[in-house]
Image (cartoon, rainbow, N blue to C red):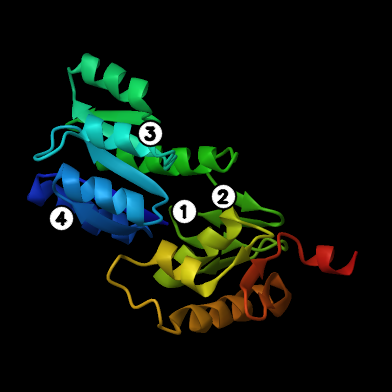
Amino acid sequence: MRLLLVEDDRLMAESLQKRLSQHGYAVDWADNGIDAEFMGREEPYDLVILDLGLPQCSGLDVLRHWRQDDNRVPVIVLTARDAWHERVDGFKVGADDYLGKPFHFEELLARIQALIHRSHNLTGEVLRSGDLQLDEESQKVTLPNGEQLELTGTEFRLLRYFMLYPGSILSKTRLTEHIYEQEFDLDSNLIEVYVRKLRDKLGNERILTRRGQGYIFVKRILEQHT
């Protein structure tokens, strides 16, 4: 999943980028409102972490403009711990959740996971898609027979995205845009490489190739025989 972090405190932003990357998120960073508004309009983010106190353009204005343009990207607003009025204003213009500063990283991570799951009508801490379960904390997948397999960082990011969009045709470009940061080469063939690696672990019938279009993730292997 690809996130946009909008925070003008460089030290905090660098720390959050590093820790979120360790948990399988590709993170782009903007340190002012103008850049944030542009990036959120032009790039296909899965979620935005938005500080309200930004230079050049306030976080509230950024969010208001996104919603006016019908950009429904999930947004977690960062506010001062005692600024209840900022939380109210944020919800009024379209925020999905808020977190007061200072905060524990574990709480931010839990809110990110919960909001992404909620935006896909999923419940529970473990991501389930058909007969597979993906533990986002340990980055392990549980097969229908109960066997647990460890995943590399890229395998985990790719499988998580597949499991959030079962049955959909996902192009290589779309997959690349959602599991890598902004500067990644969209012409790279790494997606093909990691699709092969996932097939080796999950079975060839789990991820189908639609020639000239992309890939389809199959929730249950038996569905292909009914």
Q: Which residue is mark 2?
A: 127
Amino acid type indicated by mark 3: Gln
Label 2 with label 1: CB-CB less than 8 Å: yes
For the point 57% across and 43% down, the residue is 120
Amino acid type indicated by mark 1: Glu
Q: In the drawing, does residue 21 fall left or right of residue 30? A: right
How far apart are labels 3 and 2 at the CA level? Answer: 32 Å
Dot placed on the residue nearer the N-terminal end, 4 or 3: 4
Please give the label number shown on residue 14.
Answer: 4
Residue 96 in sight in this render = yes
Q: Crowding near pointer 1: few (<14 within 10 Å), some, many (20+)?
A: some
Q: In the drawing, does residue 180 fall left or right of residue 147? A: left
Tell me residue 44's x, y (percent). 41, 55
Please give the label number shown on residue 122.
Answer: none
Q: In the drawing, does residue 128 fall left or right of residue 42? A: right
Of labels 3 and 2, the one closer to you: 3
Note whether 1 is above or below 170 in the view shown: above
Residue 104 in sight in this render = no
Q: Crowding near pointer 2: few (<14 within 10 Å), some, many (20+)?
A: some
Q: Crowding near pointer 4: few (<14 within 10 Å), some, many (20+)?
A: some
Q: Which residue is mark 1?
A: 136
Tell me residue 146's x, y (percent). 68, 60
Tell me residue 199's x, y (percent). 62, 78
For the point 47% across and 71% down, the residue is 173
